Amino acid sequence: MSHFAPPAFEAKICPPGELATRVALLARPLVFTNGCFDILHRGHVTYLAQARALGAALVVALNTDASVRRQGKGGERPINGLESRAAVMAALESVDLVTWFDEDTPLARILECRPDVLVKGGDWPVEAIVGASEVQAWGGRVHSIAFLHDTSTTATLARIRGAAC
């Protein structure tokens, strides 16, 4: 039986307690985004690539499983646990660091990172993005990126369950 070292991408997974130290090593401008990213689809990876293009490094903060459940997306969500979602996110070329938050919002991680650019998907108007006023106050920019693909995890799950074709 052969033993392999963990894949290199797993080094991108960063516990919240190490975030400030690890972010200090990343190139600037630093881009920050957050979400559940439960079942990764084309819309997610397109959005993440667009977010990364706004700076030199991208930090993604994932909702913990408990935080996802509090969002009211359904009792079975998330489908994939935090450890799996973090590994899949870390494996993406556009992502430089992955962390997580258990609160209802990522504000604590945003304040710890002090990103130059804060990004959310097109369903979020800039004025409603958590952390927008803080990032703008230190001279950063906030973007709401329009969706290029009509995809969602909820729609994917409905198709899997045969509820839609």
Image (spheres, rainbow, N blue to C red):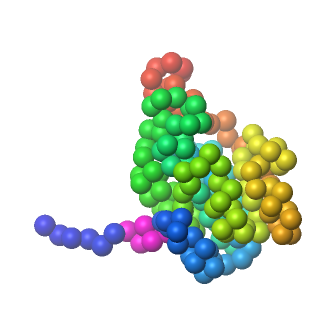
Query: What is the x, y in percent for residue 74?
Result: 52, 29
Residue 129 falls left or right of residue 18: right
Q: Residue at x 54, y 65 (%)?
A: 16
Q: Nearer the viewer, residue 42 or 62?
A: 62
Please say whether residue 9 is one of the residues in the magenta stretch: yes
Residue extent of the magenta highlight: 7-12
Q: Please, is residue 67 above or below residue 18 in the view?
A: above
Query: What is the x, y in percent for residue 41?
Result: 55, 44
Q: Main secondary structure of the magenta part?
A: helix
Q: Residue at x 52, y 37 (%)?
A: 69
Q: Please, is residue 108 above or below residue 37 in the view?
A: below
Residue 67 appears in the figure: yes
Query: What is the x, y in percent for residue 54?
Result: 75, 64
Determine the image quadrant of residue 123. top right
Determine the image quadrant of residue 27. bottom right
Residue 136 falls left or right of residue 101: right
Residue 163 falls left or right of residue 140: left
Q: Please, is residue 24 above or below residue 14 in the view?
A: below
Residue 44 appears in the figure: no
The mark total stands at: 0
Please say whether residue 117 is one of the residues in the magenta stretch: no
Quadrant where the N terminus lies?
Answer: bottom left
Query: What is the x, y in percent for residue 149?
Result: 67, 40
Q: Residue at x 48, y 44 (%)?
A: 65
Q: Nearer the viewer, residue 27 or 139?
A: 139
Q: Nearer the viewer, residue 123 or 20?
A: 20
